[in-house]
Image (cartoon, rainbow, N blue to C red):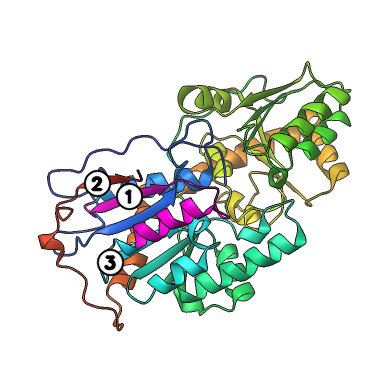
Amino acid sequence: MGELRAPPVTATGADGTGADGAGAATASTAWPLHVLMPGDVDDPGSPSGGNAYDRRMCRELAASGRPVSEAAVPGSWPRPDAEAGAELARELAELPDGAAVLIDGLLACGVPEIVVPQSGRLRLAVLVHLPLADETGLAADVAADLESREGETLRAAGAVIVTSDWAAREVTERHGLDRARVHTVCPGTDRAPLAHGTDGASRLLCVAAVTPRKGQTMLAEALAKIDDLSFSCEFVGSLDRDPHYAGQLRRAVDQYGLSDRVRLSGALTGRPLAEAYDAADLFVLTSHAETYGMVFTEALSRGIPVLATAVGAVPDTVGRAPDGSIPGILVPPGDIDALADALRRWLSEPTIRRLVTTSARRRRDGLQGWPEASRRLDEVLEGLHHEQTELPDSPDSSESPESHGQHEKRRSP
């Protein structure tokens, strides 16, 4: 997903609702939710769409009255060492019988030997941001092993939560899941001011961790094909996720003579990230796989048109304006010539720029907010919590220290 950090959530109102007045939980339904996330969820040097989604959902649910207890588990997920695996096992074992648990799929899906034995006593929901085997560049045997492990985990879960309808269809079919247990909860987007841009054309922005799945070297090659035109491009995203690939990108920029036009800014958050968006005329991301792509809606929330590869859920995420127009340009994945041609048309044809920019500004009004997204997640979790199963009765939330809308963070030692 993209390189974003969630802003602080507004405090719960006196009536027990969130800032928008629509609480997801009431005093009579406020059973506690336990959330397990990757250890780097709050690392400003390595932001990701998945981490931003996890963090923001926790805050929104807590703000609306749902008691949320968090644990961030360090480790090289989804293939942890023994110490990290043991820590996850301890976190799960310490939860009371019948507890409602939301666990990030990056933790859960690679270790069915840890998660599946707990699925019989916990109300377990697994949140899949990206199928593990879809990460670009994996060896065939590694991908096959992760695929098998993920399927075993998801088939044991009480609910599987994904971020797009495309992802729901994908994980259901590839793992033979019961479709009724696979739920779409799309991310939200914060309303943002319209971007000022630079000159309306030449300032390009790419926001994503620099990894093979995001395809930045392909974008650099496409930019080299249009070096007769005036443009600049800023790559915003962690350079530490895959240092080898980041090195490839740097060498490509130098090899193509783009050093004076391309900037690798690393990970940005807060005001610097907002400033990068504000200066952008066109948002560009050439992913090889996406199950949603939060950065697309972050750009559209500012009225910035997008140029993207039509892969996975991207066409649905980019969506359409009320008049049916596409707020950007979509190209086939892996087609560098098509990408270069689309960039050339954007830079050379004012009519195309006017049409897609107008469409992007209209599209922003139809984007889902985070309160709406969290209400949908809470509905799914409510259904799981109240299912008639053979699980032991869950603890009385009124007796829990977390039963009054508190937002507790549990940190691993």
What's the residue at 43%, 37% (across, down)? 42
Q: Which class describes the residues within 10 Å of circle 3: few (<14), some (14-19), or many (20+)?
A: many
Of helix, strand and loop, which one carries label 1?
A: strand
Q: Which residue is mark 3?
A: 99
In the picture, measured across the screen, residue 192 lies left or right of residue 328, that is left
344 drawn magenta = no
* Residue depicted at x 70% and y 60%: 142
Point out residue 293 in the picture as x, y percentages from the top left corner: 58, 48
Against 263, residue 410 (above or below) is below
Q: Which of the numbered marks, if any, corresponds to residue 407?
A: 2
Residues at discs 1 and 2 in contact (Cβ within 8 Å): yes
Q: CA distance from mark 1 to mark 2?
A: 8 Å
Residue 26's spot in the image, x, y percent?
17, 59
Residue sitting farthest toward the top = 260
Q: Nearer the viewer, residue 148 or 336?
A: 148
In magenta segment, residue 70:
yes
